[in-house]
Image: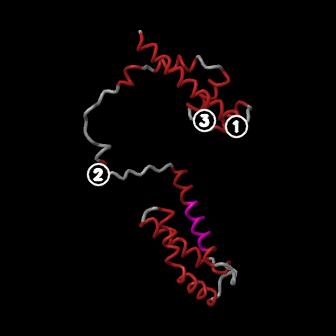
Amino acid sequence: MKATKKQQKDIQDLLSTITNSLRAFSLKLTGNMNDAEDLYQDTALRIMTNAEKYNPGTNFKAWAVTIMRNIFINNYRKKVRRNLIIDQTPNNYYINSGNKTVLNDGESEVTFNELQELVDRLPDDFRVPFLMAYQGYKYDEIAEQLGSPLGTIKSRIFFARKKLQKMYEEAMRERSVA
């Protein structure tokens, strides 16, 4: 059902009364003036295209704020799914800062084989889910393959990491004493 011309006009009038509040709320959500303006415009468009869904006599501002919040959340979820990494450094200066190689003591002190030995010492209940997570499996995929509850898998991977951290620290202490 499409909104009548009167409904469209009423919605425009209501929207004009809360424009400043909506713009302020969009800035609070986004923290960026450009993104805030985009969010406001998306919200205004959604309000106008769904004018027939507004119930006259109810709180218009609450309805509009709910629409804005939902748009913001949906956009945020899309960005997370896409795993966007936005480099905001000018001219990528820090990323492409030259061809100098800086030696990293971490690379020379611990080899992959030493780390693999530490992982191999973990009990199977912790080692298997940890290695699957390391290989890129998602928690729910690991739980399904191992036939364990999701919470159990999460805790086993967490405790495996903690145990490996402790084993690593002990190995480094032994190495520094020797």
Mark nearer the N terminus (2 vs 1): 2
Distance (Cα) linking label 2 and label 1: 44 Å
Determine crowd level at label 3: few under 14, some 14-19, many 20+ residues with C-alpha closer than 10 A: some
> To which quarter of the image does residue 111 belong?
top left
Determine crowd level at label 2: few under 14, some 14-19, many 20+ residues with C-alpha closer than 10 A: few
Q: Is residue 72 magenta?
A: yes
| Residue 73 % position (x, y) | 58, 60
- Residue at the image point whose x is 43% and y is 13% from the top: 175
- Name the kind of residue labelled 3 in the image: Tyr
Q: What residue did someone put label 3 on?
A: 137
Stretch in magenta: 64-74
Mark nearer the N terminus (1 vs 3): 3
- Name the kind of residue labelled 2 in the image: Asn
Q: What residue did someone put label 2 on?
A: 91
Q: Is residue 66 magenta?
A: yes
Secondary structure beneath label 3: loop
